[in-house]
């Protein structure tokens, strides 16, 4: 016989069940909200790394394949989930007797083997065709060496038709529109992965190996990318941008990159900045053509100071729009928007203007020179370099004074 | 007063003390030998004290001795092996690392055998059962250990035979021996009844033959070609002869690593006595190869001529810190025959310039390929 007080039981039920129901409802609401937000974020039209907005034939091939594979995979996924859910609910353990067990249903087994095999065959045919098309390199028109290191990308343009002196740059990859560009990717330290979603899929950059990736852009513009292989502390800040210029503008850009070095005028702040650069920066950063007071070329030695053996070559720095592994803009937000949102026919001229005095993002550049480690996580603390044999991964704090920074900014502005 | 055991270890400690002092003064106070001798001194003193305290473990000599255990250890040679191990370890500390490692192996082997024997003898009152458990415990270590030693001996003796034979002779011997072993295995497997004695007889005869041939060839020495290689330091990784060939025995170690071959920046050919190059992605031949700075870069060299050639990369000049003399910097592939390939992996830390001109050349062939490092 039960001696439970019915009133008390009811109160207990109210006290215990309501909070559980309430918290469950909150969790479900939160999950639904998050799912909706994630789903709706796919509808953004201005997402710079949207894989569903191809801007070149290679990315278009991947997109076309997606249009076939995604619905098939989606339908299969929905069928599997619904069936699994139905089975979980229908046959869940309610204390019923275990039904009679039978072994082997040839019709079902053959159907469940043949149908997936057919689906995979259809998907496979389209996938393999796309893979082979993307791997085609015989019709290459321009080759560029792309080298990843912690945490920036270097681009060098070997001597070939239209380029009679090698060009070396970083942060922004400049390519001509409508040209089949072949990237030869490698890495100097760890595995990285190069991905400009609007122009092609991703490809790993592996030390000691050369991996090929084809890029081609339909229209002039800037296409954003991001390293997609975890590569250490600042992986998330290892960005890149592909800048597509018309063929005429690309030729102008090449000519600009091959211009010889012009030292700043004597007795200017920039000339003092050149001296500061030689004393402080030239140990790692190369500026092609720079000479010391005796007229001897200054050759940087990043291999002696940096773990990867390289630091960005700063020749013609102010023709780029970014610095520090494309993490920061060299131009102000307004000027950046002016270039990024320019019409295709105006884009080239605006980009080739480079960084003007009015457009310089002096705030970030100065902050970087003041203390790079405060701007970007790097292994650049001189007291903690045992694992890298005393070499830096990234740029250390050079302890520059505000006076040094003034001079350096003035000098860097001359590197066009 | 002092027991024989404590006297022995006390003497050993005294000897170690004298040796350690002399070693520290005349040889090297911070050397591992000094530490070993001082360690011996301390351990000897410890054991001496322990021996003195326990009256050498002779419980019957004490008035309060309890009844002696029925256990009496059987004669064993493992303590001798263990002691031999200690001696070899000490010898190794003073002489050579290999001797030291050998001593550790002997010490470990002897110690394990001794421990297990000692444990098994007291496992029960039944000697037969004790023997059974001992073999069961030690078998798991004995057989793999002996097999490893036997395989090592076979490999060593066989390698002596191979190294003493000519290149073609070694190939022939290896082919015949492996074929005979395979055929013998098949023959034994096909027999309906396993004839253990016959197989043992054949294996014994083959082992004897191997030992005799191995010892004989070990005494006669390696073939003259290998001796010459060693004299000319061809076995050193950095060995390169980028100019005229000095030795007719120069080894052509093909560097055909598959992973590297699939990741070359450019291919340099020599054909009809002329040098040419191709880069990945470019259809035309190039006369300049742009190599990224400070980056491991693979260059494939393909010889299409009848004559043997090698690829040489000239990386300018460098002042040698010790002598102050300017010397040419560069490296090269091994020589390679017609339709064969060699790989060259470069890592050039400094950019090329008017002062530092880099190039690929092939001695004995016309032309050069410029190397530009931006």
Image (tube, coloured by chain):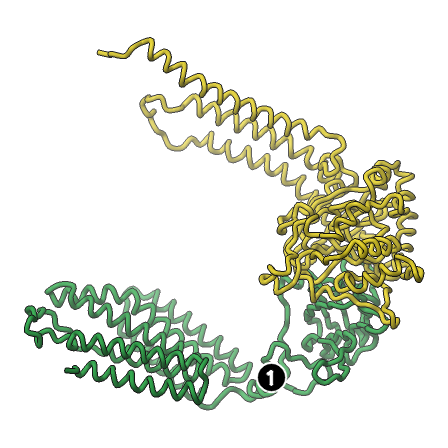
For the N terminus of chain A, give its image quadrant: top left
Which of A335 and A275 lies nearest the eye of the viewer?
A: A275
- Against B91, residue A329 (above or below) is above
Chain displayed in yellow = A
Circle 1 is placed at which residue position?
Answer: B233
Whole-percent x, y for residue B325 in the image: 76, 84
Chain displayed in green = B
Q: Image point 70% across, 48% down: which residue?
A: A375
The quarter of the displayed image where residue B153 is located: bottom left
- Against B156, residue A243 (above or below) is above
Tell me: A211 left or right of A289.
left
Which of A297 and B71 lies nearest the eye of the viewer?
A: A297
- Which chain is mark 1 on? B
Which of A164 and A280 lies nearest the eye of the viewer?
A: A280
- Against A194, residue A267 (above or below) is below
Tell me: B302 left or right of B34.
right
Whole-percent x, y for residue A335 in the image: 85, 40
Which of B114 and B156 lies nearest the eye of the viewer?
A: B114
Whole-percent x, y for residue A333 in the image: 81, 39
Where disc 1 sits, the SS reads: loop
Tell me: A41 left or right of B166.
right
Q: Image point 36% across, 80% down: which residue?
A: B38
Any part of residue A218 in sight? no
Any part of residue A128 in sight? yes
Q: Image point 56% across, 27% down: which residue?
A: A78
Crowding around mark 1 (Cα neighbors within 10 Å: few <14, some 14 to 19, many 20+) is few
């Amino acid at each position: 016989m039960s001696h439970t007080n019915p009133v008390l039981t009811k109160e207990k039920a109210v006290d215990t069940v309501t909070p559980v129901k309430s918290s469950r409802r909150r969790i479900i609401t939160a999950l639904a909200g998050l799912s909706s937000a994630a789903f709706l974020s796919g509808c953004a039209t201005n997402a710079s790394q949207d894989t569903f907005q191809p801007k070149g034939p290679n990315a278009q091939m991947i997109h076309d394949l997606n249009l076939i594979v995604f619905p098939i995979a989606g339908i299969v996924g929905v069928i599997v989930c619904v069936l699994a859910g139905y089975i979980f609910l229908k046959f869940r353990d309610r204390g019923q007797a275990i039904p009679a067990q039978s072994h082997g249903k040839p019709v079902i087994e053959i159907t469940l083997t043949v149908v997936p095999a057919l689906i995979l065959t259809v998907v496979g045919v389209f996938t393999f065709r796309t893979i082979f098309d993307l791997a085609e390199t015989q019709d290459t028109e321009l080759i560029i060496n792309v080298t990843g290191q912690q945490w920036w990308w270097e681009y060098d343009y070997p001597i070939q038709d239209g380029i009679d002196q090698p060009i070396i740059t970083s942060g922004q990859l400049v390519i001509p529109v409508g040209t089949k560009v072949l990237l030869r990717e490698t890495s100097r330290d760890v595995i990285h992965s190069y991905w400009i979603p609007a122009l092609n899929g991703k490809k790993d950059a592996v030390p000691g190996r050369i991996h090929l990736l084809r890029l081609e852009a339909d229209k002039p513009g800037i296409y954003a990318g991001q390293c997609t292989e975890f590569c250490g502390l600042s992986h998330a800040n290892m960005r890149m941008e592909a800048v597509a210029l018309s063929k005429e503008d690309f030729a102008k850009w090449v000519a600009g990159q091959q211009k010889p070095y012009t030292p700043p005028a004597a007795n200017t702040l920039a000339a003092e900045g050149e001296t500061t650069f030689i004393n402080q920066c030239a140990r790692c950063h190369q500026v092609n053509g720079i000479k010391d007071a005796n007229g001897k070329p200054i050759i940087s030695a990043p291999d002696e100071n940096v773990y990867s053996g390289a630091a960005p070559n700063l020749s013609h720095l102010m023709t780029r729009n970014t610095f520090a592994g494309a993490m920061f803009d060299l131009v102000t937000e307004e000027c950046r928007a002016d270039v990024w949102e320019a019409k295709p026919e105006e884009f080239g001229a605006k980009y080739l203007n480079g960084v003007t005095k009015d457009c310089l993002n002096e705030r970030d550049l100065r902050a970087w020179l003041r203390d790079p480690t405060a701007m970007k996580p790097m292994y650049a603390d001189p007291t903690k370099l045992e694992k890298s044999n005393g070499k830096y991964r990234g740029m250390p704090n050079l302890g520059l004074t505000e006076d040094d920074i003034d001079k350096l900014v003035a000098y860097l502005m001359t590197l066009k | 007063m002092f027991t024989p055991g404590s006297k022995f270890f006390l003497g050993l400690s005294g000897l170690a003390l004298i040796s350690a002092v002399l070693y520290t003064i005349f040889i090297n106070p911070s050397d591992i030998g000094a530490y070993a001798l001082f360690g011996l001194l301390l351990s000897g003193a410890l054991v001496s004290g322990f021996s003195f305290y326990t009256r050498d473990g002779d419980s019957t000599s004490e008035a309060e001795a309890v009844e002696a255990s029925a256990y009496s250890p059987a004669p064993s040679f493992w303590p001798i092996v263990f002691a031999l191990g200690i001696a070899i370890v000490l010898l190794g500390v003073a002489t050579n690392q290999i001797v030291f490692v050998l001593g550790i192996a002997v010490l470990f082997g002897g110690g394990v055998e001794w421990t297990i024997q000692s444990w098994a003898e007291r496992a029960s009152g039944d000697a037969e059962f004790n023997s059974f458990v001992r073999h069961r415990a030690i078998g798991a270590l004995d057989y793999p250990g002996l097999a490893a030693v036997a395989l090592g001996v076979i490999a060593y003796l066989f390698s002596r035979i191979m190294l003493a034979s000519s290149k073609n002779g070694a190939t022939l011997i290896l082919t015949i021996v492996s074929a005979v072993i395979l055929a013998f295995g098949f023959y034994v497997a096909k027999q309906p009844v396993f004839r253990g004695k016959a197989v043992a007889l054949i294996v014994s005869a083959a082992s004897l033959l191997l030992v005799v041939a191995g010892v004989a060839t070990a005494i006669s020495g390696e073939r003259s070609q290998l001796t010459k290689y060693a004299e000319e330091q061809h076995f050193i990784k950095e060995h390169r002869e980028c100019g005229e060939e000095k030795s007719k025995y120069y080894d052509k170690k093909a560097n055909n690593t598959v992973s590297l071959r699939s990741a070359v920046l450019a291919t340099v050919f020599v054909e009809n006595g002329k040098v040419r190059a191709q880069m990945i992605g470019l259809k035309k031949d190039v006369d300049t190869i742009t190599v990224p700075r400070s980056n491991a870069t693979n260059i494939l060299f393909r010889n299409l001529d009848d004559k043997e050639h090698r690829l040489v990369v000239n990386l300018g000049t460098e002042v040698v810190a010790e002598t102050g003399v300017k010397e040419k910097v560069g490296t090269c592939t091994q020589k390679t025959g017609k339709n064969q390939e060699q790989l060259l992996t470069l890592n050039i830390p400094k950019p090329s310039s008017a002062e530092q001109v880099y190039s690929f050349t092939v001695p004995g062939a016309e032309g050069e390929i410029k190397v530009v490092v931006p």
